[in-house]
Image (cartoon, rainbow, N blue to C red):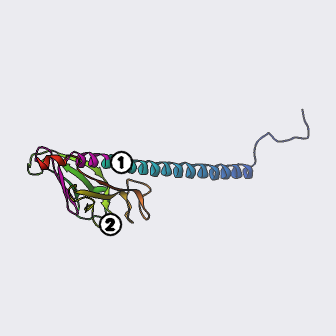
Amino acid sequence: MNKLRTTCGGFTLTEVIFSVFLFTLASAGVYKTFIQTALNVKAGNSQASFVAMGRSAEQKILKYIQQARAVAPQSTYLDIMTTDSGIARIYFEDMDGNPYTAEDNFLRYKANYLDNNSPVETLCGHVSFLDGEMFRNLSIDAQANSVQVSFHVGDGWSYQDTDTYGTGAGYQGVEVRFSATPRNVQFLYR
């Protein structure tokens, strides 16, 4: 037995306080890193979701226009004459009357616009305007009435959507710009 050691083993109060302080500091740093990583992943997922919504809406709108006989664009809607001489409409709908709150702005498609009981398909959410008009005529060919479509999917203003991290000042989302021409124009000249 060691006669020089007169006390039992253990830590002094200063050592315990110092080790608790270091543990708390390290835990806070790790916690902050985990939180920031989770928020960045959520923002990346939101961006990926906006890109997917934009691509899906573009493909659906292209399909409806290309299968049409004629189109008549206005700034917030596009009337489509279908091959059975019906009138379909793709239109912008703002649920709260404020175009800057993009989470409640939609692009919708109604297969028979003149029938109130016709079902409505939502093509895309989080939609806002680009260049003032969503749909406009392109005078490429006198017979084929081409249309230019442009809109933004995501949050493009300084609005902070509390459910979607990564929104706010800046330009989150995707710009969708394309043109299309009806392919069933021959039905008009029979």
Q: Position of residue 26 (x, y in %)?
A: 64, 50
Q: Which residue occupies 57% across, 51% down?
A: 33
Identify the disc placed on residue 163.
none
Q: Nearer the viewer, residue 16 or 125?
A: 125
Q: Earlier in the sequence, mark 2 or mark 1?
A: 1
Kind of element beneath mark 2: loop
Q: In this figure, which residue is indicated by the disc labeled 2?
A: 131
| Residue 75 magenta-highlighted | yes
How many numbered markers are drawn?
2
Q: Nearer the viewer, residue 11 or 108?
A: 108
Q: Quadrant of the N terminus?
A: top right
Quarter assignment of residue 144: bottom left
What segment is highlighted magenta in the picture? 59-87
Identify the disc placed on residue 55.
1
Q: Position of residue 100 (x, y in %)?
A: 31, 64
Residue furthest top in the image: 1
Residue 5 shows up from this direction: yes
Badge 1, how many Cα within 10 Å: few under 14, some, many 20+?
some
